């Protein structure tokens, strides 16, 4: 869900940015690959070619931002998970009598009943 918001933010930002700096790659390159003649025909006051290149850039940068965001989130989740594993192993201790693994908070071993 948040990835979609990141996409949208970058889509709008990069589309607007390309309207100011039309040469920002790869919008123009994609447009040229389509083999469509450039036109200054205005759409909403903006030349159609510039508008289309802007939308290409918005989509491309939006997708890149979305992918980077989801990779970063996945890495963060993994880090949190491994942190929890460390925390849960730290909360264990071993019986001084029989060596059984027992919770840190307990005062008696659940296996042999020895006081800790
Ligand atoms: Zn024990």
Image: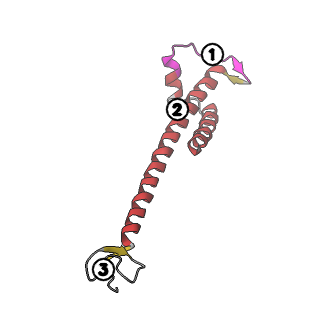
Q: Dividing the image into four quarters, tell me where ligand 1 lies.
A: bottom left
Magenta stretch holds residue 40: yes
- The correct choice, above or below, for 88 with respect to 110 in the image is above
Q: Which mark is residue 112?
A: 3
| Residue where numbered disc 1 is placed | 39
Inter-mark Cα distance, 1 to 2 = 22 Å
Could you tell whether 15 is left or right of 102 in the image?
right
Residue 72 vs residue 37, the one in the foreground = 72
Is mark 3 in CB contact (under 8 Å) with mark 1? no
Residue 64 lies, in percent from the top left, at: 49, 38
Residue, disc 2: 60
Report the residue at 39% width, 63% height from top. 85
Magenta run includes residue 61: no
Instruction: Kindly report the distance in space between the C-alpha atoms of the residues bearing marks 3 and 1.
Output: 86 Å
Which stretch is magenta?
31-44
Q: Earlier in the sequence, mark 1 or mark 2?
A: 1
Callout 2: SS: helix
* In the rendered image, the vertical position of residue 21 relative to residue 79, given as above or below: above
């Amino acid at each position: 869900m948040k990835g979609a918001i990141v996409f949208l933010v970058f889509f709008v930002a990069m589309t607007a940015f390309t309207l100011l700096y039309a040469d920002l790659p790869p919008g123009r390159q994609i447009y040229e690959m389509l083999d469509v003649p450039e036109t200054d025909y205005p759409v909403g006051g903006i030349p159609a070619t510039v508008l289309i290149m802007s939308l290409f850039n918005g989509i491309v940068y939006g997708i890149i931002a979305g992918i980077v965001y989801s990779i970063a989130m996945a890495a963060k989740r993994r880090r949190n998970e491994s942190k929890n594993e460390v925390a849960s192993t730290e909360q264990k201790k071993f019986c001084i009598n029989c060596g059984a693994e027992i919770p840190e908070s307990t005062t008696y071993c659940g296996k042999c009943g020895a006081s800790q």
